[in-house]
Image (cartoon, rainbow, N blue to C red):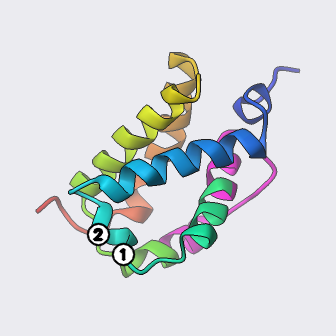
Amino acid sequence: MSQTIYEKYGGFKTISRIVMTFYEMALDSDQIGGYFADIDMPRIIDHQTKFVSSLVGGPASFSDERIEAVHRHLNISHADFDEMTELFSEALAEHGMSEPDIRTALAAIEEKRSIIVVRDAA
């Protein structure tokens, strides 16, 4: 049985570091930084770590309905989603993930685009 990406890179601890790196970049982003103003960052990092873990073979699980419900009110555009995936790709690479594994992780995130994005790019 082959290892999941989650297992291959050290599980929750590593995914948590990747997510923290992502949010450091996201907060500095002119495109998406505003989404995180007045947000409980430790809480969102914990939730996002569980979400990303679930996408790369970890134990957590989130229904599409739940994912859609927590993002619906944010009015996220395709351009915002693209920026998020670019920054996330950079965070994955920064933490030593291989290109094939980055592509796999980003493909799992891309599968959620239709339930996260609620408007066309402005």
Q: In the image, is residue 48 part of the stretch drawn in magenta? A: no
User: Secondary structure beneath disc 1?
Assistant: loop
Choose top left, top right, bottom left or bottom right for residue 34: bottom left
**Mark 1 sits on what residue?**
37
Q: How far apart are marks 1 and 2 (CA)?
A: 5 Å
Residue 51 horizontal/vertical position (percent): 64, 56
**Mark 2 sits on what residue?**
34
Q: Residue at x 73, y 59 (%)?
A: 61
Q: Which residue appears farthest toward the right when viewing the image?
A: 1
Query: Which numbered circle lies on residue 96?
Result: none
Residue toward you, 73 or 88: 88
Residue 98 horizontal/vertical position (percent): 57, 18
Residue 109 horizontal/vertical position (percent): 49, 46
Image quarter hosting the C terminus: bottom left
Q: In the image, is residue 54 part of the stretch drawn in magenta? A: yes
Residue toward you, 73 or 87: 87
User: Secondary structure beneath disc 2?
Assistant: helix
The correct choice, above or below, for 77 with respect to 83 in the image is below
Left or right of 112 on screen, residue 50: right
Q: Residue at x 47, y 77 (%)?
A: 39
Residue toward you, 16 or 68: 16
Q: Residue at x 88, y 21 (%)?
A: 1
Q: Do the residues labelled 1 and 2 touch (CB within 8 Å)?
A: yes
The correct choice, above or below, for 60 with respect to 5 in the image is below
Left or right of 54 on screen, residue 22: left
Dot 2 surroundings within 10 Å: few (below 14), some, or many (20 or more)?
few
Amino acid type of the residue that numbered disc 2 sits on in the rendered structure: Gly
Can residue 46 be seen by looking at this rendering? yes
Amino acid type of the residue that numbered disc 1 sits on in the rendered structure: Ala
Give, as a single range, the part of the protein colored magenta: 50-68
Dot 1 surroundings within 10 Å: few (below 14), some, or many (20 or more)?
few
Can residue 57 be seen by looking at this rendering? no
